[in-house]
């Protein structure tokens, strides 16, 4: 690989676990499934920076085949040893190659979705826009970059959806069992927001309002955490541009317009 072809990015720690990205996969296959169904050719989905184990790419392929059985998932990693280790798992509709944010695919191929989870978390905040821009240039016309972060076993996750025009939404996804307050997801906010959870920043105000609504919905807890979360989000929706509905809230998931939570000041 020549210097001009060198992958864009840095090798990350690469830690991962089976089923860790199930919440995001469920969202891609659900509300975003139309991006795959609309594609005239077999849609391509990229698992960018899949880490030391290719399991998340394998799982993504399995889950998205329920949406389009001809979907092709490409796992892309900057570490050549990780790519070599994944190669034996290749099969029809699943492949692996070396690369970075330049998203190297066959000539003319543009991905419908690029999922980059727990990748930019290890970068500096001021590096995020350039990484987003590189991926945006590669997307299909209806394509989407999903830049997210989650805990080690996938119980708390947050991701930013970025299309060709820029970031469009922030999604929070939480396991209801044992949840003390929704703002527990704050430590898993994507890099573009994780340092913005401070007074004066919109995302801080959003999480604070969500916590207050959760506290006021405590009487609903006798019917279960799910009913309590439904009530809390219904209240928050009165003052924040929530983009989804009860079907998603029941999963512990909430999506809000990016413009409402975007950083108030430059990095």
Image (cartoon, helix red, strand yellow):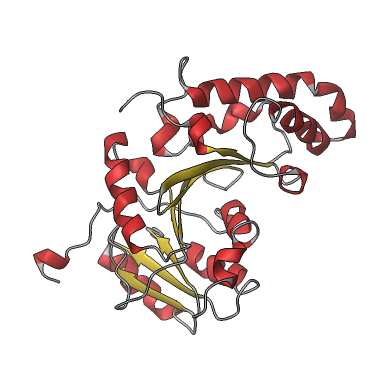
Q: Residue furthest right?
A: 223
Inspect this view and state whether residue 150 appears: no
Residue 113 versus residue 168 in the image, above or below:
below
Task: Point out residue 197 in the picture as x, y percentages from the top left corner.
Answer: 47, 24
Residue at image point 34% right, 57% down: 135
Residues 44 and 227: in front is 44
Give the percent coordinates (x, y) of residue 243: 64, 42
Query: Can you name the residue that lies furthest to the bottom here?
Result: 92
Q: From this viewpoint, which residue is outermost toward the left? A: 3
Q: Is 142 or 233 nearer to us in this picture?
A: 142
Using the rendered view, name the quadrant where residue 217 is placed: top right
User: Which quarter of the image is occupied by the N terminus?
Assistant: bottom left
- Is 104 positioned to the left or the right of 86 in the image? left
* 224 left or right of 78 in image: right
Q: Residue 133, image x and y in percent?
A: 31, 51
Which residue is pictured at 51% across the width and 44% down the height?
159
- Quadrant showing the C terminus: top left
Drawn side of residue 86 relative to residue 216, left or right:
left
Q: Nearer the viewer, residue 71 or 35?
A: 35
Give the percent coordinates (x, y) of residue 145. Answer: 44, 55
Q: Is residue 152 something one can see in this rendering? A: yes
* Res 47 → quadrant: bottom left
């Amino acid at each position: 690989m020549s210097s001009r072809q060198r992958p864009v990015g840095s090798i990350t720690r690469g830690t991962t676990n089976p089923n860790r990205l199930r919440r995001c996969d469920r969202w891609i296959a659900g509300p975003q499934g139309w991006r795959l169904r609309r594609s005239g050719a077999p849609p391509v989905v990229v698992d960018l920076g899949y880490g030391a184990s290719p399991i998340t790419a394998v799982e993504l392929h399995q889950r998205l085949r329920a949406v389009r059985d001809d979907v092709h998932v490409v796992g892309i990693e900057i570490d050549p040893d990780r790519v070599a280790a994944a190669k034996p798992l290749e099969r029809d509709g699943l492949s692996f190659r070396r690369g970075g944010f330049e998203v190297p695919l066959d000539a003319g191929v543009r991905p419908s979705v690029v999922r980059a989870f727990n990748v930019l978390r290890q970068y500096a905040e001021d590096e995020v826009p350039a990484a987003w821009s590189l991926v945006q240039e590669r997307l299909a016309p209806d394509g989407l970059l999903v830049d997210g972060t989650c805990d080690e076993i996938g119980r708390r996750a947050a991701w930013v959806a970025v299309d060709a025009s820029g970031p469009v939404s922030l999604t929070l996804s939480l396991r209801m069992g044992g949840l003390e307050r929704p703002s527990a997801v704050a430590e898993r906010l994507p890099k573009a927001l994780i340092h913005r959870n401070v007074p004066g920043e919109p995302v801080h105000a959003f999480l604070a309002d969500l916590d207050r609504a959760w506290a006021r919905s405590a009487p609903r807890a006798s019917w279960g955490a799910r009913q309590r979360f439904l009530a809390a989000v219904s209240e928050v929706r009165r003052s924040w541009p929530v983009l989804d509905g009860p079907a998603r809230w029941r999963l512990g998931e909430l999506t809000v317009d990016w413009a409402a939570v975007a950083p108030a000041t430059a990095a």
